[in-house]
Amino acid sequence: MAEAGVRAAEGTADRGWRLRHLPVLLAASAVLAALAGVVGGVTGGTAGALGAAAGVAVTVASYTLTTVVLAWADARDPQLLLPFGLGLYVAKMSLLGALMIGVAATGWAGLVPLCLGIAAGVLVWTGVHVWWLTTVHARHVRG
């Protein structure tokens, strides 16, 4: 296993690689949020529009936080990835659970669109990330 100093030196050669995919993912998510808001509005009125767009926003915030924190941890020492990743996962799932319980307790009509927005956000973020890794990143690594 490489020493932390060696790994950090390798990372300084191309500092941006850990976050290079983020603008593409954020742009795709912005398009999805707008589309989700329109579909939610047409099918569920204002609550549907807000719920669907908020669901996408929850997913984007969660994945962006994970990306930034893990990029930071990896740049410092790869051995930080597991504790930071697991800790962040537990914290995010706890917050998501509390959010969903809190929203469900209000009886808000946007709850189902919120859930669908979260699911759509996960699918789009994952799909675009896979596309980026297999096309853009793969070309960059080979080239």
Image (cartoon, helix red, strand yellow):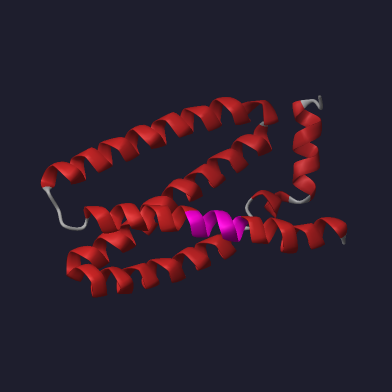
Left-right relation of 49 to 134: left
Q: Quadrant of the N terminus?
A: top right
Query: Magenta stretch: residue 78 in it?
Result: no
The image shows residue 18 at horizontal and vertical percentages of 66, 49
Question: In the image, is residue 63 above or below residue 127?
Answer: above
Viewer-proximal residue, 12 or 90? Answer: 90
Q: Is residue 125 visible?
A: yes
Which residue is found at the position 58% from the left and 39% from the top? Answer: 70
Question: In the image, is residue 74 above or below residue 129?
Answer: above
The image shows residue 106 at horizontal and vertical percentages of 12, 46
Question: In the image, is residue 98 above or below residue 21?
Answer: above
The image shows residue 121 at horizontal and vertical percentages of 44, 57
Q: Quadrant of residue 137?
A: bottom right
Farthest residue in the right direction? 143
Which residue is found at the position 66% from the left and 61% from the top? Answer: 131
Give the residues in magenta. Answer: 123-129
Viewer-proximal residue, 53 or 111? Answer: 111
